[in-house]
Amino acid sequence: MNSTIILLIIASYFGVLMLISHFVSKNTSDDSFYTGDRKSPWQVVAFGMIGAVMSGVTFVSIPGMVSNNYFYYLQFVFGNVVGYVFITFVLIPIYYNLKLVSIYSYLETRFGSITYKTGSLFFLISQSFGAALRLLLAAKILQYAVFDAFNIPFYLTVIIILILIWLYTNKSGIKTIVWTDTLQTTFLLMAAIVSIFVIKNSLDLSFSETLTSVTEHKYFKVFNWDFNSGSNFFKQFISGVLIAVAMVGLDQNMMQKTLTCKNKKEAQRNILTFSLFLALAQFLFLGLGVMLYLYAEKFGIQLEIENGKFINTDNLFPMLSLNNFGIVAAISFILGITAASFSSVDSSLTALTTSFTHDFLDINHKNSKEKKRLKNYVLLGFSLVIFIIIMLFSASKGDVITTIFKVAGYTYGPLLGLYMLGIFTEIKIKDTVVPYICVLMPLLTYYINYIVKDKFSFDLGFMNILLNACLTIVCLIFIRKKND
């Protein structure tokens, strides 16, 4: 597909985002950037959150990973649904009752200011890495599809994307993102559906035959009962519950959207609806993955294999969409990955800015002019942080989604431990010791995971978040105040 045409498509898409931003940003207040004035329709928030959670990682990693991981990812998704129920009925009422803007201010109410800032800092680290890794994948694809043809270096591609995101988010932040995420989710799903229809027609299959070809394929293995495997059902399901709670319920990025709903009941409807449709969307992308491999096999497309496993599986969907599926599928893919690259970072930057300005700069006590100045500086600063992380990981290979969840197990584990102890006990702790525990427990978790894998061939997989959280809770109990 001609690179100039692709560039025009991206420019047109960005123009639509700017138009949405222009209309949404009218009559904004100082707090609109952070709260969306708490007037967002819950249906719009729920649909938009699908694209924000899936991002470019789900868009290309999940279809590609089925060759090596089959449908085992669904075990994780089943756990996610249970986690979202916990968020709906436990966390949402807490956040709304306390009227929070930054969700980490709960920790100050429960434990003290040092714990509060520690929790916020762990979010800042987690979200910066997560957003950077998501954007890295999308930027690599756009580099291959567009910018290489114009001899634009990769670092400049990343800078261009970050500048574009800054342009439509800097004025009204989350108020704009609630609506732009809806558009981005639409293009993500459309790209998958168009590709499925193209493959179906290329393989000369009916709809029922397509469904049968997926469900009867050798990759259609949903449950893994091998207890030593990292993709064992119990490990995947439990970690799915905990990671959903941590990466959505304890994540300023996801919860900031939910807290723009008008009231608690609408926020709860938002999460329940979102969880159902997200699970269906993830199944759709897994099914697409099987069809991509069927297409490659049918038409003799050679894929990279090393030690009996496919490698660089994130490249499969982009390669076929841009080179084999025709103009309509190529345009759909470009719109989908562009939507993914923007949606994966715009809300993250807004959440990072919200957390830092509220948790560390006490922005509520500044005047209007000072609020605007600080917000812009912080937004620019985190854009630079994400750029640096992307460049550090620019040579990485393999499916990014596995890397993101493994990193999340270490960075979100202490947060999960703090919230679980706070919600389910009345224990009071020595606030000043919390930072040391939250730094040491991920390191200890990493060491234990290394030992059991090396000595006993037992892979914790994504379950490192449970071990991390439990170690954090045990240590916090040891430092409880004596009168407890």
Image (spheres, rainbow, N blue to C red):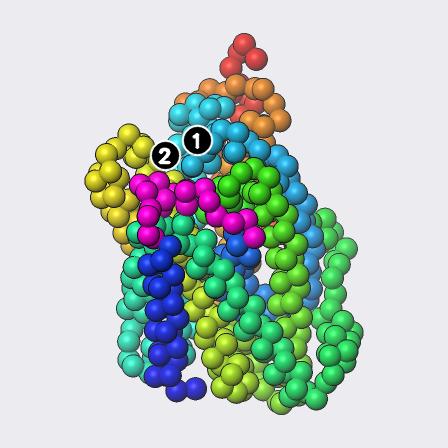
Establish if 194 lies above or below 263. below
Q: Is residue 153 left or right of residue 274?
A: left
Percent position (x, y) of residue 277?
A: 63, 57
Residue underneath mark 2: 359
Q: Is residue 242 above or below residue 429?
A: below
Q: Earlier in the sequence, mark 2 or mark 1?
A: 1
> x%, y% of residue 37?
41, 42
Foreground of the two, 252 or 184 = 184
The N terminus sits in image quarter: bottom left
Marks 1 and 2: in contact by CB < 8 Å?
Answer: yes
Q: Residue at x 58, y 77 (%)?
A: 194
Report the residue that reaches farthest toward the front. 27
Which residue is under mark 1?
105
Residue 23 image-quadrant placement:
bottom left
Q: Nearer the viewer, residue 66 or 353?
A: 353
Q: Amino acid at mark 2?
A: Asp
